Amino acid sequence: MFGSNAFLIEGESVGNGYLTPFMESIGKNFTNGVNFAIAGSKTLPRLDSFNLHIQFAQFHRFQSLSLELFNKGDGNLLGDKDLRNALYSIDIGQNDLDGIFGGLIYEKAILKIPDIISEIENVIKAIYEQGGNNFWVHNTGPLGCLPKSLATYKKNENDYDENGCLISLNEGFVNPLMGCCGYGGPPYNFESNNKCGQGNYTICEDRFKYISWDGIHYTEAANGFVASKILSTHYSTPPLKFNNFCNIAP
């Protein structure tokens, strides 16, 4: 799993459990996969903190060590067949888009999107060249419904769709528009000087009733809803079940 906020709920839902984090590798079992995702990561700049390029470098190192130790009899790691048959999942881009749309006018911001896509494409090609065959790339959520977008962007009444979301940033999404963790209360509970974890922020009592956690990222409840739709196979072509890619003990 590569990206920022990983959709780890799918693995839990099929009895596979959470993926083992690469950064907590001592004495761990990686036979059901490994998670390279880091909260807050982006695709660009390439060498910033744990952005996608760095995560791929970590994967390259893991792949090399895993093959070496697997061939020496370590049953907690992955062999060549495992790595070739694995499902490589990439969930990244939301933080990139939040940054460019927050700092540039719309016309200039959209010109940056091909660079984001290109970074994801390059990683997919690199993994494929190293033997990977199965890829699952998640789309980002509707930016125009994020509490941060609604609270900070300049707009007029003609900028909203029937759901109260910004038309320029997405095509509409029916759900509450208020962040669980933030400051300011309704309608968005977002203030740039009191972000979640900073200043005078508060946390909602029932986070399961919210889509947005902090004005940018989604809550576990929202991710769970999306995961349930993915697992239904109604949105996949062909409609493959997710557990086809999991090593689940009988």
Image: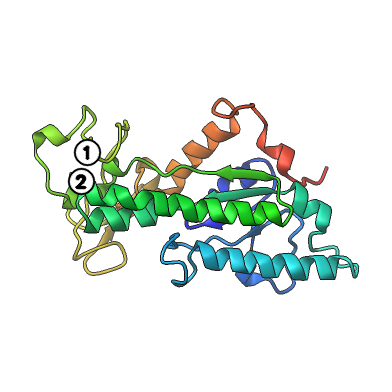
Residue located 64% across and 71% down the image: 24
Viewer-nearest of labels 2 and 1? 1
- What is the x, y in percent for residue 147? 25, 48
Mark 1, Cα crowd under 10 Å, few <14 / some 14-19 / many 20+, is many
- Could you tell me how far apart the alpha carbons at marks 2 and 1 are, in whole angstroms? 7 Å
Which of the two labelled residues, at mark 2 and mark 1, occupies the earlier sequence position? 2
Q: Amino acid at mark 2?
A: Leu
Q: Which residue is mark 2?
A: 150
Q: Are marks 2 and 1 in contact (CB under 8 Å)?
A: yes
Q: Residue at x 83, y 70 (%)?
A: 68
Residue 188's disc number: none
Q: Which residue is mark 1?
A: 166
Q: Is residue 58 visible?
A: yes
Query: Which quadrant, please, contains the C terminus?
Result: top right
Q: Nearer the viewer, residue 207 or 50?
A: 50
Q: Is residue 51 left or right of residue 245?
A: left
Q: Nearer the viewer, residue 56 or 153?
A: 56
Q: Nearer the viewer, residue 180 or 96?
A: 96
Q: Residue furthest left?
A: 156
> Against 50, is 85 above or below?
above
Locate the N terminus and report the quarter of the image it occupies: bottom right
Q: Residues within 10 Å of mark 2 (few under 14, many from 20)?
A: many
Q: Disc 1 marks which amino acid?
A: Leu
Callout 1: SS: loop
Left or right of residue 41, residue 149 in this image: left
On the image, which quarter does residue 166 sit in? top left
Q: Where does the image place residue 83, in percent across and percent down from the top left?
A: 75, 54
Under circle 2, the secondary element is helix
The residue depicted at 32 percent of the width and 32 percent of the height is 173
